[in-house]
């Protein structure tokens, strides 16, 4: 399940990167425009598949953790993981506001789903890091570092919002929103990826250990 989750995550990341170089979405500014802008054009299908692939990889990650009994079926990590996964599905179902037309109810749903997802995912990873890697400090701290970096990117957006509410420039102009959101998405994908890769390596080590003959044992002739 971890390998399938890692493959699904990689498909999503590759497709999202491809949107930056294939026409016509290659004309969208990665500095000022958010990733959701790709869903407003003819390459919407690629954006949708990319997001759904990440959602599937995420679901497989938390499902595998439950299967391994690293976390309980009903627990905070599962709740946060579910919120993250569902938020991705909502993002696909409700595209962002097309400001060439004006705001919409679906666009607002998209925005709030994004907020929930960007907060839920790093919290979920922080909570599962020790359970996933109780004896592998490197993988545990790698996952935590990516989760904290994700929260840091999101925090930069919150600073812009606070500045806007205090009478400053609009929050979407306070910082290069496109770069910040891409950093946010990259660190979130890295957080998921670190846990999945670590789980794959862990299962491989356990498999090799179980298959290694003990001293004095006689190998089976069957």
Image (cartoon, rainbow, N blue to C red):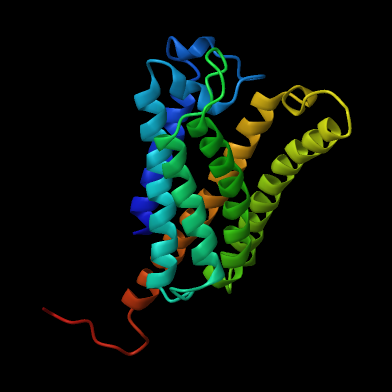
Q: Which residue is at the far bottom? A: 216
Where on the picture, by quarter, is residue 22? top left
Residue at 42%, 28% in the rendered image: 47
**In this picture, residue 98 sits left or right of residue 31:** left
As drawn, 167 above or below 68: above
As drawn, 75 above or below 117: below
Residue 186 position in % (x across, y down):
58, 38
Residue 146 position in % (x across, y down):
64, 49
As drawn, 35 above or below 2: above
Where on the picture, by quarter, is residue 127? bottom right
**In this picture, residue 59 sits left or right of residue 171:** left
Q: Nearer the viewer, residue 29 or 195?
A: 29
Residue 156 position in % (x across, y down):
77, 38
**In this picture, residue 41 sits left or right of residue 220:** right
As drawn, 203 above or below 96: below
Residue at 68%, 31% in the rendered image: 180
Q: Which residue is at the far left? A: 222
Residue at 40%, 49% in the rendered image: 57
Residue at 59%, 54% in the rendered image: 120
Q: Nearer the viewer, residue 60 or 82?
A: 82
Residue 217 position in % (x across, y down):
29, 88
- Can you say which quadrant of the picture contains the N terminus? bottom left
- Can you say which quadrant of the picture contains the C terminus? bottom left
């Amino acid at each position: 399940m971890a390998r399938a989750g890692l493959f699904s995550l990689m498909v999503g990341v590759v497709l999202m990167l491809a949107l930056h170089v294939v026409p016509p979405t290659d004309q969208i500014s990665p500095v000022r425009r958010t990733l959701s802008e790709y869903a407003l054009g003819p390459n919407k299908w690629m954006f949708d598949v990319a997001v759904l692939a990440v959602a599937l990889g995420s679901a497989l990650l938390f499902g595998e953790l439950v299967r391994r009994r690293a976390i309980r079926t009903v627990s905070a990590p599962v709740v946060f993981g579910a919120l993250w996964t569902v938020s991705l599905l909502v993002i696909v179902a409700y595209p962002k506001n097309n400001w060439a037309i004006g705001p919409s109810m679906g666009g607002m749903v998209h925005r709030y789903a994004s907020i929930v997802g960007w907060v839920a995912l790093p919290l979920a990873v922080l909570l599962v890091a020790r359970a996933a890697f109780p004896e592998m400090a490197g993988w545990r701290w790698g996952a935590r570092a990516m989760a904290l970096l994700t929260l840091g990117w999101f925090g930069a957006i919150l600073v812009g919002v606070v500045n806007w509410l205090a009478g400053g420039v609009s929050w979407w102009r306070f910082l290069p929103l496109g770069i910040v959101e891409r950093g946010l998405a990259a660190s979130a994908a890295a957080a998921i990826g670190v846990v999945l890769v670590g789980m794959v390596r862990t299962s491989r080590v356990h498999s090799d250990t179980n298959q290694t003959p003990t001293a004095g044992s006689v190998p089976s002739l069957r």
